[in-house]
Image: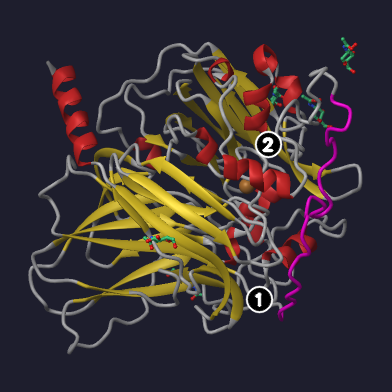
Amino acid sequence: MKGIFLLFLSLLSIIRAATVTYNWSIDFVNAAPDGFSRQVIGINGAWPCPAIEGTVGDTIVIHVFNNLGTESTGIHFHGINQLGSQVMDGPSGVTQCPIPPGSSFTYSFVLDAPGSYWYHSHNKGQYPDGLRGPLIVHDPHDPYKGQYDEELVLTLSDWYHDSVPVLIQQMLATSNTHFLPPFPEALLTNDASSVSFKFQPGKTYKIKIISIAAFASTFLQFDSHTMRVIEVDGSYIEKHDAYQIRVAPAQRYTVLLNAQPATRRNYAFLASLDMNRDFSDLNARPPNAYPFNITGTLIYDAAKPLPAPYVVRSWNPVNDFTFAALDGERLLGTPNVDITLNFTFGFDAKGIPRTFFNNKTYVPQKVPSLFTAFTTGTENTNPLIYGAVNPFVVKKGDIVQLTVNNLDAAIHPFHLHGHQFQVCERASSGKGTFNGHTRNFPSVPVKRDTIAVNAGSYSTIRFKAQNPGVWLFHCHIEWHVIMGLIATIIEAPEQLRGLQIPDDHKAACAAQGIPIAGNAAGNTQNLTDLTGAFTTPPVPDNGALFPKRSLIMPKAGPIRRDRYYGN
Ligand SMILES: *[C@@H]1O[C@H](CO)[C@@H](O)[C@H](O)[C@H]1NC(C)=O
Ligand SMILES: *[C@@H]1O[C@H](CO)[C@@H](O)[C@H](O)[C@H]1NC(C)=O
Ligand SMILES: *[C@@H]1O[C@H](CO)[C@@H](O)[C@H](O)[C@H]1NC(C)=O
Ligand SMILES: *[C@@H]1O[C@H](CO)[C@@H](O)[C@H](O)[C@H]1NC(C)=O
Ligand SMILES: *[C@@H]1O[C@H](CO)[C@@H](O)[C@H](O)[C@H]1NC(C)=O
Ligand SMILES: [Cu+2]
């Protein structure tokens, strides 16, 4: 009976499904969100970038024109599962070739689930230069419908004054012996240095909090308004009160806030960058030297004074591992695939700082990995043919258990494309590596697509392999992606054989002389012959087919150390 009802609902949503079309020119524009003017990557001559918005079941079509002149691009739709549209996921070298300057490319995919998502460039670490924005999927069957009056969006992001190519060059240098990522110069809320929302007494507001940051997590606390978290990363949860949250790069929290009953005064909220250990600074600067706090305001009465900068004594954010999925989906059964990824920093043979899973850094290959799966027939189940992309092949229907052992002394957020996974365990800092015991696994785990793994600790997730495609698993600190902290899940390759590559994908590859068939090296005869495949990581950006921007801007000094290491 329930099945028939659900079928009815999904038929209903097919009937009402619309196609939402966007025409985007990707442009360089100037912006000064924190008062410092710099070149950023915008859309249709403007920045901040627009939100993508639709309803579950809608088809989103985005015609992209790369107007960057000197630089390739590519867009990923974070958290969209791309069921049956694996070729639209967006990461360059994985599901497509980069879009070369002067060319057009169309993304088309169905919004498979409601919630708060975002999109961003997945090409050469480009999104901290501005190419990112919210992606909101409305839900006609919202289980929390009727419990709020208005919807708001709050994006959180670190911000840099130098452009990404410059930052990468500085980071991938033999002199960077402490594996330091670039340090941000500012925190932005809604891509600006201040934020205020109009509140009316008695109303309830639904705020979609989306981190579009490249490195730093953000703490958030509202004065006198308790957050009721109802969704994380596109998964509804049982309502959970939170006084403070910590939003890691790429994570989303949707919260309900009850407005005060009267317009007695205006209220503040604090967004504060988590100066995690990665900010370690040997020449500690005076506190308050950086604008890493933004006091936002909830305006009840514009005639009344604005609240003073909000001060929070200490951060003890809600532990999102204690959330429970609202749909009640139980812990997936005994896994038949067990993947362990030990994450460490280290140097490559040239002495350049890298990130490793099981001692191996990700090396982009000639042929995008998905096209290897499309074109290699029955051999596409052999991980070796994908080259040095940390490949893991899982069969359709497998229950996959994946553990990240974070051997670093800072928190890192890990993201899996194509899935909302169950978080089976997320141990507190300093707990070491996973010992295989499942006794702490909850019966109804929270589902997310990005999990913050504590320092010197681990997290274990599970998912069912039922989405044929090639899905990256990576740290969502963009700088660590550049350093190689990526694994590749080749899911149900037996269902990828012979699938067609769209014409504009082919054209993008052809324009750059990139092969689209065969193993990682483009060999189509002997697929286990990887002669010509890349085995060493790019230095620092040698895959670049187009000259990089040179945009050396004045650099701010280093940043002080913080004490938050996770709960
Ligand atoms: C997109 O561009 C095409 C071709 O120029 C045009 O026909 C179409 O109306 C545009 N769509 C939108 C939504 O702007
Ligand atoms: C940011 O806010 C936190 C919490 O209120 C405070 O401890 C810290 O000193 C503030 N930092 C700056 C730079 O103002
Ligand atoms: C990960 O590290 C643990 C602890 O050092 C070790 O026992 C395990 O074998 C490692 N796993 C892999 C895949 O390297
Ligand atoms: C990884 O490297 C460490 C240190 O060099 C070594 O002890 C360990 O055995 C290596 N692990 C694997 C799985 O190769
Ligand atoms: C295919 O290449 C592998 C690796 O170079 C080699 O060992 C194997 O003999 C080759 N197979 C054939 C049939 O040539
Ligand atoms: Cu990381």
The total of numbered circles placed on residues is 2
Give the x, y percent position of residue 478.
Answer: 62, 53
Residue 409 is at least partly visible in this image = no
Give the x, y percent position of residue 24.
Answer: 48, 62
Question: How many angstroms separate mark 1 from mark 2 (CA)?
Answer: 44 Å
Q: Is residue 553 above or below residue 225?
A: below
The one nearer the camera, 497 or 364, is 497
Q: Is residue 547 magenta?
A: yes
Res 312 → quadrant = bottom left
Q: Helix, strand, or loop for circle 2?
A: loop
Which residue, given by chain and number where applicable, does mark 2 sit on? 368
* Magenta: main secondary structure: loop
Amino acid marked by disc 1 = Arg
User: What's the residue at 85%, 50% (across, down)?
Assistant: 352
Q: Helix, strand, or loop for circle 1?
A: loop
The residue segment tinted magenta is 530-554
Q: Is residue 215 above or below residue 345?
A: below
Amino acid marked by disc 2 = Pro
The answer to whether the residue labelled 1 contacts the one labelled 2, judged by CB atoms less than 8 Å apart, is no
Looking at marks 1 and 2 on the same chain, the residue that comes earlier in the sequence is marked by: 1
Picture quarter with the N terminus: top left
Disc 2 residue lies near ligand 5 with CB under 8 A: no
Instruction: Pick out the residue farthest to the right.
Output: 350
- In the rendered structure, the answer to whether residue 529 lies left or right of residue 455 reads right
**Label placed on residue 346:** none
Give the x, y percent position of residue 514.
Answer: 75, 42
Res 325 → quadrant = top left
Q: Is residue 561 magenta?
A: no
Which residue, given by chain and number where applicable, does mark 1 sit on? 285
Q: Residues within 10 Å of mark 2 (few under 14, many from 20)?
A: many
